C-alpha cells in the first residue's frame, strides 16, 4: 500500500455521552480477583497506594481517586478493606460506590493531607497496620505505579515504589523480606488486572476518546498563522474530565522540548507543530508542520511527505493490519522498526502501548515480546518518530480489541458506542485505506487522520 494525499472533509461520528458506570458486581469482582491473586502469590495483605499522579490502581480497586492528597487501601483478612484518606479526601469518599454500598471501611489519616493541616485525632500508621493484623507472620504486597526488573535493580521484588514512610513501617512490622512489590498484579501487560478492559471500561474509554479527539479536532480546524499558542489551546474547549497527562503544545521556539506546553509563542508558517489532549483513558496527539503546502517548509524538508510522513503512514498501515487478537508484541514492533530505520526516523519508545485511565499503563510491544494481544486490551497507536530535518508526524489515538463475546456485550449495553465504533471502522477502511480486523474498535473521532500540513487540514494522508 502506498500513501496518497487527498482532500476531503473531516468525518462526523456523533457526540458521545457519559456511559453508565460499572455495576456494583463488577466492582466487587475486582476485589475478589485481587484476593484470589493474593492467595496465588502467598500474600496475606495488599497495600495499594495512590496520589494525584498515581491514581489508577487505587481507583480500579476502591472507586476513589485521590485528588490532591494521598490515599491507601489495605486488603487483608477483614472482608471489608480499609481505605485511609486525608482530611479533605474524607468528604470525597462517596464517589466510591463500594464505599456507599458498605463494602469498604475508612479511616482518616491526616498525614496524607497537605503540609501544616491539622494532624490530631488519628492513630499512628503502625497502629493502623497492626489493627489490620500486619505482623511478623504477614507477607505484604505493595502496589504503587511501577514494578522493576533485574536490569534496573539488584532485588526487583523488594524494590518498593510507594513512599518510604509507608514501606518502612510495613517492613518494621512484617520484616524486610516479607514486604514485596506487587504492582505487576495490576499493570503487567500480559497478566495485569488492568491490561484488559470490561465492556463498561471500554465504553468509558470510547467516551473519553471521543471527547479528547473532538477537542483536538476543534483546535486543528481553528488554528491559523499568527495566533498565540495560548489562544490555540483554548480552542480545545476543556470539558471537565480529569486529564491523564499534561497537554503539550510544541512550536518552533519549543521544538526541542517535546513535553512543553504553550509559552506565548506566535504561530509562524513553516515551523513545526505538535500537540496532544488526553483525558482519563484517552490521548489524541498529532505532529507535523504549520504549513499549507510543501513550499512553506524549510528547503531541506520539502520532501517531508514522500520521505517521512508518507512512509510512516504506510508503516502504520501494516501496524493496523497486524492489530488483532493473537498477534505478538514483537510482530507489532517489527511492523514499524523494520520499515522505519532508526537513523532516519529515530523511533526510540515502544511502537504502541496499553492505555487505561492512565495514559501509559504498560507495553506488550517491544523487541522479542512473546505477549499476545488479547480481547479487552486498549492500545494506543503511539508511534513517535523524530528527525532534525523533518521534525515528526503522528497518528496517536486509542483502539480496543474485542472478540465476538465482548462485542456482543458492548452492543447490548452500549449500542451508541458500538455504532460510533462501526462508523469509524468504515471510515478507516473505505476512505483511508487501512486494513482492520473485525476485532478492532476505534475509540477516537480522529481515528487514522494524519494531516501533514496543519494549515490545510483538509489535505489528509490515505493508502491505496
Image (tube, rainbow, N blue to C red):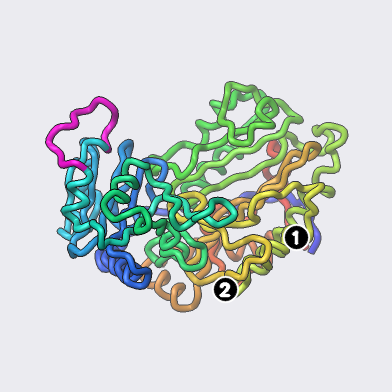
Neighbours of disc 2 within 10 Å: few (<14), some (14-19), many (20+)? some
- Name the residue: 87% across, 33% down: 299
Circle 1 residue:
463
- Name the residue: 53% across, 58% down: 354
Q: Is residue 15 magenta?
A: no
Q: Is residue 113 magenta?
A: yes
Label 2 sits on a secondary structure element that is loop
Would you place residue 164 above or below residue 199 in this image? above
Quarter of image, res 389: top right
- Nearest the eye: 237 or 150: 150
Circle 2 residue:
325
Residue 172 is at least partly visible in this image: yes
Asked whether the beta carbons under mark 2 and mark 1 sit within 8 Å of each other, the answer is no
Pick the quarter of the image with the N terminus.
bottom right
Would you place residue 114 above or below residue 145 in this image? above
- Name the residue: 24% across, 53% down: 96
Neighbours of disc 1 within 10 Å: few (<14), some (14-19), many (20+)? many
The residue segment tinted magenta is: 112-124
In the rendering, at what x and y percent does residue 291 appear? 74, 34
Would you place residue 455 above or below residue 373 in this image? above
In the rendering, at what x and y percent does residue 425 appear? 58, 64
Name the residue at the left extreme.
121
8 relative to 280 in the view: left or right? right
Nearer the N terminus, badge 2 or badge 1?
A: 2
Amino acid at each position: 500500500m502506498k500513501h496518497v494525499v487527498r482532500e476531503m472533509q473531516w468525518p462526523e461520528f456523533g457526540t458521545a455521552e457519559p456511559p453508565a458506570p460499572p455495576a456494583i458486581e463488577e466492582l466487587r469482582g475486582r476485589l475478589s480477583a485481587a484476593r484470589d491473586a493474593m492467595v496465588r502469590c502467598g500474600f496475606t495483605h495488599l497495600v495499594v497506594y495512590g496520589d494525584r499522579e498515581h491514581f489508577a490502581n487505587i481507583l480500579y480497586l476502591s472507586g476513589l481517586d485521590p485528588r490532591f492528597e494521598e490515599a491507601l487501601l489495605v486488603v487483608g483478612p477483614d472482608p471489608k478493606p480499609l481505605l485511609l484518606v486525608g482530611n479533605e479526601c474524607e468528604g470525597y469518599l462517596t464517589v466510591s460506590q463500594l464505599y456507599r454500598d458498605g463494602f469498604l471501611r475508612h479511616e482518616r489519616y491526616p498525614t496524607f493531607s497537605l503540609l501544616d493541616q491539622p494532624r490530631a485525632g488519628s492513630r499512628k500508621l503502625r497502629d493502623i497496620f497492626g489493627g489490620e493484623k500486619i505482623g511478623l507472620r504477614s507477607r505484604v504486597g505493595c502496589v504503587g505505579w511501577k514494578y522493576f526488573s533485574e536490569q534496573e535493580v539488584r532485588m526487583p521484588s523488594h524494590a518498593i515504589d510507594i513512599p518510604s514512610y509507608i514501606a518502612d513501617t510495613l517492613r518494621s512490622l512484617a520484616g524486610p523480606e516479607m514486604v514485596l512489590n506487587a504492582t505487576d498484579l495490576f499493570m503487567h501487560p500480559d497478566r495485569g488486572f488492568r491490561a484488559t478492559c470490561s465492556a463498561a471500561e471500554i465504553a468509558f474509554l470510547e467516551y473519553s476518546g471521543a471527547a479528547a479527539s473532538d477537542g483536538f479536532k476543534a483546535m486543528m480546524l481553528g488554528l491559523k498563522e499568527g495566533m498565540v499558542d495560548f489562544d490555540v489551546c483554548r480552542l480545545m474547549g476543556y470539558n471537565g474530565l480529569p486529564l491523564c497527562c499534561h497537554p503539550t503544545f510544541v512550536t518552533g521556539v519549543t521544538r526541542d522540548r517535546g513535553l512543553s506546553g504553550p509559552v506565548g509563542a506566535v504561530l509562524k508558517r513553516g515551523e513545526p507543530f505538535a500537540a496532544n489532549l488526553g483525558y482519563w483513558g484517552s490521548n489524541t496527539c498529532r505532529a507535523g508542520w504549520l504549513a499549507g503546502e510543501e513550499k512553506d517548509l524549510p528547503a531541506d524538508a520539502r520532501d517531508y511527505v514522500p520521505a517521512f510522513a508518507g512512509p510512516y503512514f504506510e508503516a502504520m498501515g501494516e501496524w493496523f493490519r497486524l492489530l488483532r487478537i493473537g498477534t505478538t508484541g514483537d510482530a507489532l514492533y517489527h511492523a514499524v522498526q523494520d520499515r522505519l530505520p532508526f537513523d532516519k526516523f529515530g523511533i526510540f519508545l515502544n511502537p504502541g502501548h496499553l492505555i487505561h485511565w492512565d495514559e501509559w499503563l504498560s507495553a506488550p510491544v517491544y523487541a522479542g515480546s512473546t505477549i499476545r494481544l488479547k480481547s479487552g486490551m486498549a492500545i494506543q497507536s503511539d508511534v513517535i518518530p523524530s528527525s532534525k530535518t523533518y521534525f515528526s508526524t503522528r497518528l496517536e489515538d486509542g483502539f480496543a480489541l474485542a472478540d465476538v463475546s465482548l462485542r456482543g456485550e458492548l452492543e447490548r449495553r452500549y449500542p451508541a458506542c458500538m455504532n460510533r465504533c462501526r462508523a469509524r471502522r468504515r471510515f478507516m477502511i473505505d476512505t483511508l485505506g487501512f486494513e482492520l480486523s473485525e476485532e478492532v474498535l476505534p475509540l477516537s473521532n480522529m481515528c487514522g487522520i494524519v494531516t501533514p500540513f496543519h494549515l490545510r487540514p483538509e489535505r489528509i494522508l490515505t493508502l491505496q
